[in-house]
Amino acid sequence: MKDLSIMVPIVTPCTPKGELDLDGLRAICHDMLSAGCTSIFVVGSSGRGPWFSREDRTRICRTIADEIDPDVPLLAGCMASGLPQMLENAYAMADAGARMAVVTAPGYFHYNCQEIEAIFLKFADESPIPVIVYDIPDLVGLKLDGEMVVRLAHHGNIVGFKDSSSDFERFKAMLTGLDGLPDFHVLQGKERLLFDSLVAGASGFVISLLQIDPRPFASLSQATRSGEIKRARHIQAEISKVMDILEESFKRRPETSTLFHFLNWSLRQRGVCDNILLEHEGDCPQWLIDNARQAFELCSAASSI
């Protein structure tokens, strides 16, 4: 698989009313790249892409494009509820400097596998930039068929796949099925599976918890790729403990904003940006602050392993 190493699905700093904080966005970008992240993904799930207007998403993408070196891959979420809007997003993001378009299956309506494949192929035919197919069943409501993804990989404008399904057996099967496509990107999107995925041959990973502290994730990638297996396993075990805390938090507070509260506390603690929360998400409960602090301390300790 073609190496993409560590991709950060960057959050979007803003005021509680949703006005963009572009200085904060630049600060997070520099924080991530200086810690070892190698590519940036804007206006995805972690960046609240569906929340912001296309104009704001374009400003976010252009701000990062103007801030990073030309050799840093910049991906932009182009998800929408229908193919016309997906393509409109792709053209807008390409004009704003994105080098790859990331798309899920369209939401709202229910599709079968053949319909989804046809939509992805039509999008790839018309997209002005190369395409990454993104599987995130928790938000889209369906899991993509692995054999379909392997077929899509042979389209000249589809260059990668991000897997946030937690189905590691399918992930390994897809790596085998894509073995003859060395320029294709296969990215893991689940924190518990990072080490195993890199060992299996993944191109890299893209995870929101990088923003708690990117250093242990960079150390995990470096240790795995350099053959320091014992050290890599140790770091992965600590990252899994962080996931235990986050998953327990979601059991108590299942709203998506639980993640944003979690990340917001850590970003403020590290002095990176002031806010990524919206006013309707309310104040962070003390128990969630305590959980975020514990996760932050685990990440800080893991960075020195």
Image: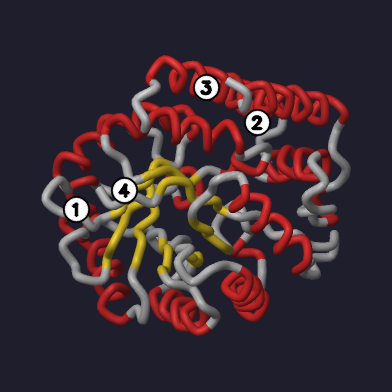
What's under tag 3, amino acid-wise? Ile
Q: Nearer the viewer, mark 1 or mark 2?
A: 1
Label placed on residue 186: 4
Q: Residues within 10 Å of mark 3 (few under 14, many from 20)?
A: many
Task: Please provide percent x and percent y for residue 16.
Answer: 85, 59
Task: Using the image as rendered, state which of residue 229 and residue 249 is in the foreground.
Answer: 229
Marks 3/2: CA distance? 23 Å
Q: Is residue 175 left or right of residue 197?
A: left
Task: Residue at 44% x, 74% y: name it.
Answer: 86
Q: Is residue 49 above or below residue 38?
A: below
Reading the chain from its start, which is encountered first: label 1 or label 2?
1
User: Where 251 sits versus 49, above or below?
Assistant: above
Mark nearer the N terminus (1 vs 3): 1
Q: At x 88% / y 42%, what residue is drawn?
A: 283
Nearer the N terminus, badge 2 or badge 4?
Answer: 4
Q: Amino acid at mark 1?
A: Pro
Q: Are marks 1 and 2 in contact (CB under 8 Å)?
A: no
Up the image or down, 77 lies above or below 274; here it is below
Residue 181 is left or right of residue 77, and the answer is: left
**Image mark for residue 250:** 2
Q: Nearer the viewer, residue 266 or 224?
A: 224
- Residue 43 x %, y %: 58, 63
Task: Please provide percent x and percent y for residue 99.
Answer: 43, 72
Distance between mark 1 and mark 2 Cα atoms: 38 Å
Give the crowd class for mark 2: few <14, some 14-19, many >=20 residues within 10 Å: some
Reading the image, the residue beneath label 3 is 235
Displayed quadrant of residue 244: top right
In this rendering, the answer to whether 152 lies above or below 208 is below
Q: Is residue 7 left or right of residue 157?
A: right
Mark 1 and mark 3: Cα distance apart in space: 28 Å
Residue shown at 73% from the left, 24% from the top: 297
List the residue tagged with mark 1: 182
